[in-house]
Image: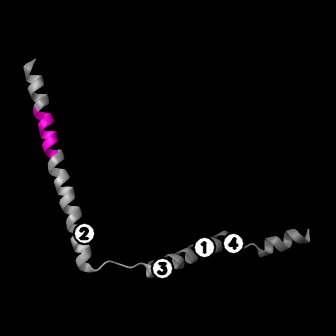
Amino acid sequence: MENEKKTAAKKENWFKRTGKAIGRKCKEIWQELKKVTWPKFGVMLKQTGVVFAVVLFFLVILTAFDFGLSALLELLVSIK
């Protein structure tokens, strides 16, 4: 009976435990972010330009492919 009272008294509220765990996790995340080596602005700008160029290239290719297939479908439908 005494052991049950001691464990019940020692056990914290769920909200307190969760709040402490969230606070600890946020602190760990902040410490890890301090270790990150961020790229220079010029490098980041160059890499962003490369990403935009690749996306634009594939956008043009897929759009042309879509228009080609649409034209082919209209041609096949008009034959009947």
From mark 1 to mark 4, how far is it between C-alphas?
12 Å
Foreground label between 3 and 1: 3
Q: Secondary structure at mark 1?
A: helix
| Viewer-side residue, 37 vs 3 | 37
Mark 4 or 2: in front is 2
Q: CA distance from mark 3 to mark 1?
A: 14 Å
Which amino acid does the dot numbered 3 rest on?
Answer: Trp
Residue drawn 66% across and 69% down? 14
- Kind of element beneath mark 2: helix
Q: Amino acid at mark 2?
A: Gln
* Badge 4 density bin: few <14, some 14–19, many ≥20, Cα 10 Å: few
* Mark in front: 2 vs 3: 2
Percent x, y for residue 21? Answer: 60, 73
Q: To which residue does mark 1 refer?
A: 21
The span picked out in magenta is 63-71
Q: Quadrant of residue 80?
A: top left
Question: Which is more N-terminal, label 1 or label 2?
Answer: 1
Q: Can you identify the residue that label 2 sits on?
A: 47
Pinpoint residue 20: horizontal percent, then vertical percent. 61, 76
Residue tagged by mark 3? Answer: 30
Q: Earlier in the sequence, mark 4 or mark 2?
A: 4
Towards the viewer: 6 or 27: 27
